[in-house]
Image (spheres, helix red, strand yellow):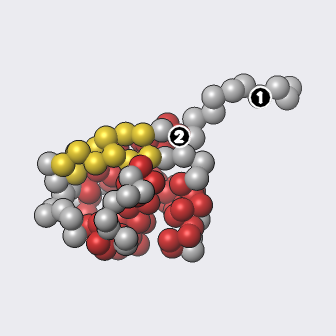
């Protein structure tokens, strides 16, 4: 599934498929499914906290940045940026609070079960 998300006033294409966790693992040596579940849990806590900056750790931001980069690179394999740092340098500044929910939504839609189980 693809999505266009506005990042720093630029339209950026992101893709989430069955290949995305493999790409993430190749980049980070970590499990995307575990990481994104933790990130989603912490993001949900932000909705309840009065100070959202305390809800996301440096580790959460690391997961977000790497996930966003992998999904953007997956959608655009010819992009010039070869690392998450290079990719982030292509933006002046952007709000994590604007982009993160869209990344989580894209991942969620990619993982919705499309068929019913035949097992009873």
Q: Quadrant of the rendered structure where residue 39 is?
A: bottom left
Rendered view: 81 above or below 68:
below
Picture coordinates of residue 25, whole percent (x, y):
57, 67
- Say which of 64 and 91 sits in front: 91
- Would you say 25 lies left or right of 72 here? right
SS under mark 2: helix
Mark on residue 26? none
Mark on residue 110? 2
- Would you say 98 lies left or right of 13 here? left
Q: Is residue 44 visible?
A: no
- Please state, as top left, top right, bottom left or bottom right, where the C terminus lies in the image: top right
Crowd around label 1: few <14 · some 14–19 · many ≥20 (10 Å): few
Residue depicted at 33% across the width and 46% down the height: 13
Residue depicted at 56% across the width and 70% down the height: 26
SS under mark 1: loop
Picture coordinates of residue 86, whole percent (x, y):
29, 72
Q: Quadrant of the rendered structure where residue 102 is?
A: top left
Residue depicted at 31% across the width and 73% down the height: 85
Picture coordinates of residue 105, whole percent (x, y):
42, 41
Mark on residue 117? 1
Residue depicted at 20% across the width and 56% down the height: 95
| Spatial separation of the CA atoms under disc 1 and disc 2 | 18 Å
Picture coordinates of residue 75, whole percent (x, y):
41, 49
- Say which of 40 and 7 sits in front: 7
Q: Residue furthest front?
A: 78
């Amino acid at each position: 599934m693809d999505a266009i998300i506005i990042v720093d006033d630029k339209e950026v294409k992101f893709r989430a498929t069955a290949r995305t966790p493999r790409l993430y693992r190749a980049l980070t040596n970590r499990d995307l499914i575990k990481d994104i579940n933790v990130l989603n849990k912490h993001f949900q806590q932000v909705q309840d906290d009065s100070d959202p900056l305390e809800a996301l750790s440096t580790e959460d931001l690391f997961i977000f940045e790497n996930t966003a980069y992998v999904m953007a690179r997956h959608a655009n394999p010819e992009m010039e940026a070869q690392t998450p740092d290079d990719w982030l340098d292509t933006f002046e500044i952007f709000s994590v609070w604007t982009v993160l929910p869209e990344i989580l939504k894209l991942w969620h839609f990619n993982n919705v079960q499309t068929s019913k189980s035949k097992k009873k």
